[in-house]
Amino acid sequence: QVRVVESGGGSVQSGESLRLSCAVVGAAVSTYCMGWFRQAPGEEREAVAGLEADGSDRYADSVKGRFTISEDRIKNTAYLEMTNLKSEDTSTYYCAAALCRDYLPGYYRWASPDEYKYWGQGAQVTVSS
């Protein structure tokens, strides 16, 4: 059975950095397109970053230039490197895996939660100003 397991959340000060990890268990990370979402209490889940089938990365405007998504196929793990964190980045972050390689080019919507089959348990990130 495939699972994605997150780690690395925590509390930091504004301007500091944090890295979230997402281990894929039961399958190769290369099988999927990985994505990161976040959800604050009372708000909808929003896309933060995602990887396309060709390896290109995509970001929400609010995090562009500050966050970086990557994956290590040897460690079978995806990462979200977050720098210059702001108080508005405070949220629960979710890692997710999508079977994007079955899509025809241009049809995969990295920012849509509906595209993702496997979800992590969530990691809390709290940024204090």
Image: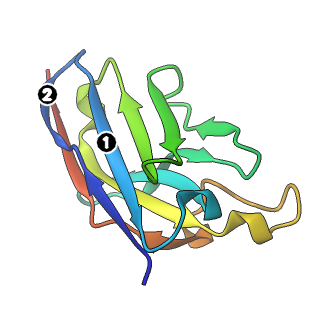
Taking depth in this image into account, of 31 and 88 the one nearest to the observer is 31
Q: Farthest residue toward the front? A: 74
Q: Secondary structure at mark 2?
A: strand
The residue identified by callout 2 is: 12
Residue drawn at the location 64% of the way across and 54% of the way down: 110
Taking depth in this image into account, of 60 and 32 the one nearest to the observer is 32
Q: Secondary structure at mark 1?
A: strand
Quadrant showing the N terminus: bottom left
What is the x, y in percent for residue 47? 50, 50
Answer left or right for 92 relative to 98.
Answer: left
Answer left or right for 40 relative to 73.
Answer: left
Quadrant showing the C terminus: top left
Which mark identifies residue 47? none
- Disc 1 residue crowd, few under 14, some 14–19, many 20+, Cα 10 Å: many
The residue identified by callout 1 is: 20
Q: Farthest residue toward the bottom? A: 1
What is the x, y in percent for residue 89? 30, 35
Taking depth in this image into account, of 18 and 44 the one nearest to the observer is 18
What is the x, y in percent for residue 82? 36, 29
Identity, as a three-letter code, of the amino acid under mark 1: Leu
Q: Nearer the viewer, mark 1 or mark 2?
A: 1
Res 115 → quadrant: bottom right
Residue drawn at the location 70% of the way across and 38% of the way down: 56
Identity, as a three-letter code, of the amino acid under mark 2: Val
Residue drawn at the location 24% of the way across and 15% of the way down: 15
Q: Earlier in the sequence, mark 1 or mark 2?
A: 2
2 above or below 120?
below
